Image (cartoon, grey):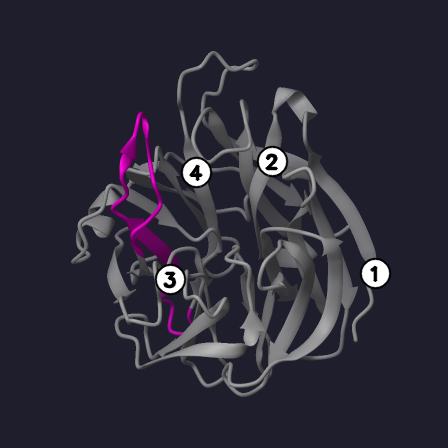
C-alpha cells in the first residue's frame, strides 16, 4: 500500500473572490513539472453560471504559477451566465500540450502551448467534431480530467453528449452518451471517434481513457447503471469499442474518476462507495481492467479526482468535498512514491 509523500492545497473556496473551485485535471509535463487545471466558479457550486477555466504550471521544486485563465466572470457575479467548462489537458509529445474547453456546454475550443504550458496560443473552435456523432445533442463536454497521446501519435480525448430538458437558461445533462474525439495532426483537426450506446452504459457521461501496455485503449465510464459500478470498454484505436462490461470490482457513486497508464498496467482513482462521494482511493490493474488491487487510500473526504503516474510517483488531484455540507472546500494535490507500476 502506497503512503502519501506530500500534500498541497491548490485552491480553496472563497479564494480570489470565487465561490468555489471544481473539476480538477492533471497532466505531467517535462522535467518533473505538472500542469493542473480546474473550473473557478464565481457565483455558486453549480455547473451553470459565471465560471472561468484556470491552468497552473507547477515546477519540480513545488513552485506554482497561473499560466492561463479563460472566461470573463464578474467578481462579485452580476447574475449573467458565462460558463466556461470542462477543461481537459492533452499531451502531444515533448513540451507541446493542448487544452480543450467548452462555452455554455454548446461550443468547444482548443488552445495549444508549445512550451509545456508556460504560455498559450489563441483558441480555435472545434465544435464541428462533436456534430459528427450520430446523437442529437444540446449539451457537449469533454472529459473532464485529461486526454492522452497514443504511442502512434494519435490524440484521444473522452467526451460526452446530452439531449437534456431545458430549464430556463440551463439544460439537464441527461439522457446522455459518452465516447471520444481523436486527432491525427497534432490537434489541428479533431473528429468523432467511438460513441458508447450499449445497454449497460445507462446515460454514460464523464469518462476517462488510458493506453494499456499492449497498445489498446481502456475507457472507464461514469454512468447511471443501477448496479452503481463503473463500465469499462476496450478499443484498438478509439474508433470502435470491441468489448464493454460492467466492472464489479469498481463501485462508484456516479462521480468523475481518473485513470492513468502505468508501465505494466493501468491505475484508476475514484470514490470507493456506491452511495457517497467519500473514500477516494487508487487501484491498479495488470490485466486490462479485469481485476483491480487497491494500492493507495488517498482521502476519506473527496469528490472528483484525476490521477497521473510519472517521475516514480502517483499523483492525485482531487476535490476535498464535505459530504455533510455539500460543498467542495478545496482542491488538493497529493503524491506518493512508488515502485514501477
State if disc 4 and disc 3 touch (CB < 8 Å).
Answer: no
Label 3: how many residues lie within 10 Å, few (<14), some (14-19) or many (20+)?
Answer: many
- The residue sitting at 68% across, 25% down in the picture is 14
Query: Disc 3 on helix, strand or loop?
Result: strand
Alpha carbon distance from label 2 to label 4: 12 Å
First in sequence, mark 3 or 4: give its number: 4
Which stretch is magenta?
150-176
Q: Quadrant of residue 155?
A: bottom left
Query: Disc 2 on helix, strand or loop?
Result: strand
Q: Is residue 153 above or below residue 265?
A: above
Alpha carbon distance from label 3 to label 4: 20 Å
First in sequence, mark 1 or 3: give its number: 1
- The residue sitting at 36% across, 60% down in the picture is 204
Q: Nearer the viewer, mark 1 or mark 4?
A: 4
Q: Quadrant of residue 194?
A: bottom left
Label 1, on which residue?
5
Label 3, on which residue?
155
Q: Quadrant of the C terminus?
A: bottom right
First in sequence, mark 2 or 4: give its number: 2
Say left or right for 147 vs 183. Answer: right
Query: Disc 4 on helix, strand or loop?
Result: strand
State if disc 4 and disc 1 touch (CB < 8 Å).
Answer: no
The residue closer to the viewer here, 324 or 51, is: 324
Say left or right for 267 vs 93. Answer: right
Residue 21, disc: 2
First in sequence, mark 3 or 2: give its number: 2
Label 4, on which residue?
85
Label 1: how many residues lie within 10 Å, few (<14), some (14-19) or many (20+)?
Answer: few
State if disc 4 and disc 2 touch (CB < 8 Å).
Answer: no
Label 2: how many residues lie within 10 Å, few (<14), some (14-19) or many (20+)?
Answer: many
Alpha carbon distance from label 1 to label 3: 31 Å
Amino acid at each position: 500500500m502506497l503512503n502519501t509523500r506530500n500534500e498541497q492545497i491548490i485552491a480553496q473556496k472563497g479564494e480570489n473572490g470565487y465561490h468555489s473551485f471544481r473539476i480538477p485535471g492533471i497532466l505531467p509535463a517535462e522535467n518533473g513539472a505538472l500542469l493542473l487545471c480546474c473550473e473557478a466558479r464565481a457565483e455558486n457550486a453549480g455547473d451553470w453560471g459565471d465560471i472561468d477555466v484556470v491552468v497552473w504550471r507547477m515546477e519540480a521544486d513545488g513552485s506554482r504559477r497561473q499560466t492561463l485563465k479563460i472566461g470573463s466572470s464578474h467578481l462579485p457575479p452580476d447574475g449573467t451566465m458565462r460558463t466556461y467548462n470542462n477543461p481537459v489537458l492533452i499531451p502531444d509529445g515533448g513540451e507541446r500540450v493542448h487544452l480543450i474547453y467548452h462555452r455554455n456546454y454548446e461550443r468547444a475550443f482548443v488552445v495549444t502551448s508549445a512550451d509545456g504550458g508556460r504560455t498559450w496560443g489563441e483558441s480555435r473552435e472545434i465544435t464541428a467534431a462533436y456534430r459528427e456523432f450520430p446523437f442529437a445533442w444540446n449539451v457537449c463536454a469533454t472529459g473532464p480530467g485529461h486526454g492522452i497521446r497514443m504511442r502512434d501519435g494519435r490524440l484521444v480525448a473522452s467526451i460526452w453528449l446530452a439531449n437534456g430538458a431545458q430549464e430556463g437558461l440551463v439544460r439537464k445533462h441527461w439522457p446522455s452518451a459518452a465516447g471520444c474525439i481523436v486527432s491525427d495532426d497534432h490537434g489541428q483537426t479533431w473528429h468523432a471517434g467511438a460513441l458508447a450506446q450499449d445497454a449497460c452504459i445507462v446515460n454514460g457521461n464523464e469518462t476517462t481513457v488510458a493506453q494499456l501496455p499492449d497498445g489498446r485503449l481502456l475507457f472507464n465510464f461514469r454512468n447511471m447503471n443501477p448496479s452503481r459500478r463503473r463500465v469499462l470498454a476496450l478499443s484498438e484505436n478509439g474508433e470502435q469499442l470491441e468489448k464493454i462490461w460492467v466492472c464489479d470490482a469498481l463501485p462508484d457513486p456516479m462521480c468523475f474518476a481518473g485513470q492513468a497508464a502505468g508501465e505494466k498496467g493501468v491505475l484508476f482513482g475514484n470514490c470507493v462507495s456506491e452511495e457517497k462521494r467519500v473514500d477516494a482511493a487508487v487501484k491498479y490493474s495488470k490485466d486490462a481492467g479485469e481485476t483491480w488491487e487497491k494500492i493507495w487510500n488517498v482521502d476519506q473526504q473527496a469528490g472528483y479526482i484525476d490521477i497521473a503516474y510519472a517521475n516514480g510517483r502517483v499523483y492525485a488531484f482531487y476535490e476535498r468535498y464535505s459530504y455533510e455540507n455539500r460543498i467542495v472546500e478545496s482542491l488538493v494535490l497529493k503524491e506518493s512514491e512508488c515502485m514501477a507500476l
